[in-house]
Image: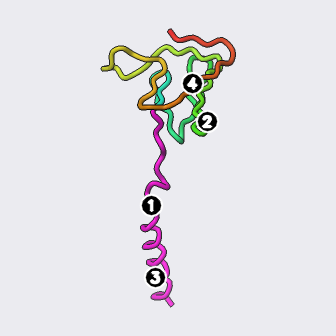
Amino acid sequence: MKKRLFAILLCLVMVAELLPTAVFAQTAYGLYVNGEQFTSEKLSVACGEGTATFDPETETLTLNNAEITKGGKSDESPKYGIRVVGDADLTIKLSGTNSIL
């Protein structure tokens, strides 16, 4: 009986190894706001007392009372408050009072 349970457990482990690792990976989008990158796990970024949210299906960035004060990496010049890497169509929706300083 123990051998049968061990064999079943071993089979399950082997099947789990066949699953693609991409299923467990997060997707990084080529969009940065306030120095932070959007990913499939992080679709909202705090910007002062407001937020910037990204909808990857519609490629829409929504700024809601956002105050963008930083951008890019410390070694980049010039710095960008909103940065799109690659070729993408980005729609920006504004809600409330927003600023890029």
> Which residue does the numbered mark 4 point to in the structure image?
46
In the image, residue 45 above or below residue 97: below
Of 13 and 20, nearer the camera is 20
Reading the chain from its start, which is encountered first: label 4 or label 1? Answer: 1
Residue 59 locus on image (x, y percent): 57, 33
Q: Type of residue at label 1?
A: Pro
Within 10 Å of the Cα at label 4, are there few (<14), some (14-19), or many (20+) other Cα atoms? Answer: some
Of 69 and 54, nearer the camera is 54
* Prevailing secondary structure of the magenta residues: helix
Q: Secondary structure at mark 1?
A: loop
- Pick out the residue farthest to the left: 75
Residue 90 locus on image (x, y percent): 54, 28
> Which residue does the numbered mark 2 point to in the structure image?
58
Q: Secondary structure at mark 3?
A: helix
Residue sitting at 48 percent across and 43 percent down?
A: 27
Reading the chain from its start, which is encountered first: label 4 or label 3? Answer: 3
Gap in Å between the C-alphas at discs 4 and 3? 49 Å
Within 10 Å of the Cα at label 2, are there few (<14), some (14-19), or many (20+) other Cα atoms? Answer: few
Gap in Å between the C-alphas at discs 4 and 2? 21 Å
Gap in Å between the C-alphas at discs 3 and 1? 24 Å
Q: Which mark is residue 6?
A: 3
Q: Type of residue at label 3?
A: Phe
Place residue 57 in its image quadrant: top right
The magenta stretch is 1-30
Within 10 Å of the Cα at label 3, are there few (<14), some (14-19), or many (20+) other Cα atoms? Answer: few
Q: Type of residue at label 2?
A: Thr
> Which residue does the numbered mark 1 point to in the structure image?
20
Q: Are marks 2 and 3 in contact (CB under 8 Å)?
A: no
Residue sitting at 49 percent across and 88 percent down?
A: 4
Colour basis: rainbow
Q: Type of residue at label 4?
A: Ala
